[in-house]
Image (cartoon, grey):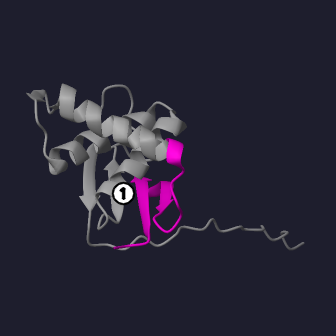
Amino acid sequence: MARLMAVLLDGIAQLEYDRERALPAQQAAYLQRLDQRMETAGISLDGEAIAQPDLAQKARFVAATLAHAIRTDQPSQAAALTSWLALRLPDLRQVKISSGVAGGAAEGGAELRIELDFATDYVRQYPIQFTPRQPRP
């Protein structure tokens, strides 16, 4: 099991989940309710209604919902869905969302590509600070 799991949009980390940190009881209860809703109401995946989704189908559904939450600036929902993926799929290392648009997120209804990466360890990204030099006289 990898300690860190990350969600990347066009190669840039959006969220990280540390599996060694305890999940608060309220959040764990929310994830349980999410599981129950998917099991009782089913899900819609690629336009197909699935009455009794298996774990892989639930994971694809949650990842797609996560991508939507990130694109529509819903940080609380994105965090909860990231927690669900990290806890239900302990070997998941990265969720890679690609917009297919050079330089940024897809516009409107543009299609996204979502990859659940179980092989590549996530390495934290750090911003690099540059200080421009003064021009020489």
- State the residue position of label 1: 87
Magenta span contains residue 16:
yes
Magenta span contains residue 21:
yes
- Residue 111 visible in the snapshot: no
Q: Quadrant of residue 120?
A: bottom left
Q: Residue at x 83, y 69 (%)?
A: 135
Q: Secondary structure at mark 1?
A: helix
Quadrant in which the N terminus appears: bottom left
Q: Position of residue 2 (x, y in %)?
A: 38, 73
Q: Residue at x 11, y 36 (%)?
A: 52
Q: Residue at x 37, y 49 (%)?
A: 84
Foreground pick, 33 / 14: 33
Foreground pick, 19 / 115: 19
Q: Position of residue 17 (x, y in %)?
A: 48, 59
Q: Residue at x 46, y 30 (%)?
A: 72
Bounds of the magenta segment? 1-26
Labels in figure, total: 1
Instruction: Locate residue 51 relative to residue 132 in the image: left or right.
Output: left
Instruction: Locate residue 5 relative to residue 43 in the image: left or right.
Output: right
For badge 1, the amino acid type reads Leu
Q: Position of residue 108 (x, y in %)?
A: 37, 25
Residue 105 vertical position relative to residue 127 in the rendered view, above or below: above
Q: Quadrant of residue 95?
A: bottom left
Quadrant in which the C terminus appears: bottom right
